[in-house]
Image: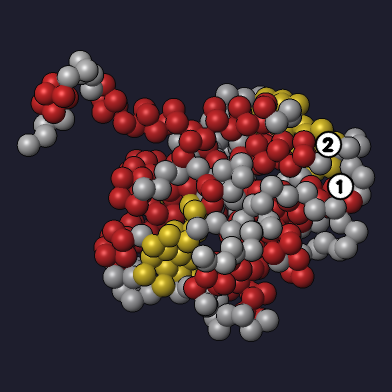
Amino acid sequence: MAEMPRPWRGVVEEYRSWLPVGPETPVITLGEGGTPLVTSGWLSELTGCDVRIKVEGTNPTGSFKDRGMTVAVSKAAEAGVKLVVCASTGNTSASAAAYASRAGMQPVVLVPEGRIAQGKLAQAIVHGARLVQVRGNFDDCLKLARGLAEEYPVVLVNSANRDGFRLAGQKTAAFEVVDVLGDAPDLHLLPVGNAGNITAYWAGYGEYAAAGHATRRPRMWGFQAAGAAPIVAGAPVEDPETVATAIRVGNPARWEEAVAALEESSGRIDAIPDEEILAAQARLAARDGIFVEPASAVGVAGLLRSHAAGLVDPGQGVVITVTGHGLKDVDTALAAAGDLVKLVVPPDPDAAARALELR
Ligand SMILES: *Cc1c(COP(=O)(O)O)cnc(C)c1O
C-alpha cells in the first residue's frame, strides 16, 4: 500500500518562514493553497510552449483571496481584533467572511451596489458578514473602508492595507509554481484588477530566486479588461465597466508596484475586450475542463491575443493563473450559453439519440 502523503496544512504552516507570523500567531486556516498546476494541451499545442494553468478556484472559498486572508485574519486574531472590514468586488468579501467567522470575528463587507456576482454575495451572507451595499463602484468602497478603519475600531483586511499581510500570503502561489516546476517559468500571465496579485507574485518569485530556490524570475504579463484598464491607459478610469466584475477597478491600489513588476521583469500589460474574455472562459471550460469566472479567464484571453499578435515565442514555460471558480458567477456563464440548455426530450432512448444526433 502506498504511504499516505502528509496532508497539506495551509499556506501559513507550509511557508511559515517566509511569512510575517511568529509562534504566538494563532493560525486561522481552511487549508488554502496547494492548488493544482494543470497542463493545458490545447494552449501548449497552439503556442508551442509548455502552458500550465494555476487553478486558484480550488481554494476553500473559490478564489486566490484565501491565501492572503489566512495571513491577514491570523494577524488580526493575534492583535485581538473583533471586527474586520473590507471593500470587495466579491471574492475578498467571501474570503474575509469565512476566515473572520472562523476566528470568531465579525466581518463587515462593503460591495458596489448591484454589481456583485450572486455566488459571492451568497458566500458573504452565509458566513455571517454584515453586508453593506455602497452606492458607488469598488474604488468608492475601498475609500469608505479605509475611512472606517481610520476612524473606528475596525481593521482593514484589503490588500491595499500597508501592513502587507494579504500580499505576503498571496506570494505563496509563486512559491508553489517553483516548487512544482523546479524553477520559475519564462512567462507568467494573470489578470490585473486592484493589482495586488501581480505585485505578490513578483515578490514571491523575487524572494525565491534570491534564496536560490529558482535560477530566474519570469516575465510578468498582466491583463486588464478593456473597460477597466487604467494601468494600460496610464490614467484612472472614472466608470470602469466589464463583465469581469472581479477586476472592475478604475484606480488600482497597487498601481505603482504593478508597474514596477512589469518594468523589472521586462513584462507588459494589455487590455482585453469582454467578448474575448467570455470566449476564453468558454474555451478553457470546453477544452481543459476548467470552469473559471470571467475575470479569471483574462490571462488565457491574454495568451490567445498575444499569440495572435506574434508575441509568444515557442519553446517557453508559461504559467497562467486563473484566479477564481466559475460557480461564483453562473448567471454570466448561462447567459453566454444561450439556447444550448433548451434541449428537451421525452424519457425515450430513441428520441434522446435523435435529439443528440447520435450515429
Ligand atoms: C481579486 C481578483 C482578481 C484581481 O486581483 P488583484 O489583486 O485585485 O489584481 C482577479 N480575479 C479574481 C477572481 C479576483 O477575485
Say which of 83 and 252 sits in front: 83
**Some atom of ligand 1 lies within 8 Å of the CB belonging to the residue at label 1:** no
Left/right of residue 1 with respect to residue 276 in the rendered view: right
> Could you say which disc has been placed on residue 105 in the image?
2
Mark 2: which amino acid? Met
Where is residue 347, by image quadrant? Answer: top left
The reply to whether dot 1 and dot 2 touch (C-beta < 8 Å) is yes
Mark 1: which amino acid? Ala
Where is residue 206, by image quadrant? Answer: bottom right
Looking at the image, what colour scheme do you see?
secondary structure
Task: Spot the residue most to the left.
Answer: 359
Label 1 vs 2, first from the N-terminus: 1
Left/right of residue 75 with respect to residue 177 in the rendered view: right
> Could you say which disc has been placed on residue 147 in the image?
none
- Give me the residue at 34% from left, 70% from top: 49
Say which of 55 and 297 sits in front: 55
- Give me the residue at 47% from left, 61% from top: 37
Position of residue 333 relative to residue 21, above or below, is above
Task: Spot the residue most to the front.
Answer: 1
Q: CA distance from mark 1 to mark 2?
A: 8 Å
- Badge 1 marks a residue whose secondary structure is helix
Position of residue 294 relative to residue 185, above or below, is above
Name the residue tied to disc 1. Answer: 77
Q: Residues within 10 Å of mark 2 (few under 14, many from 20)?
A: many
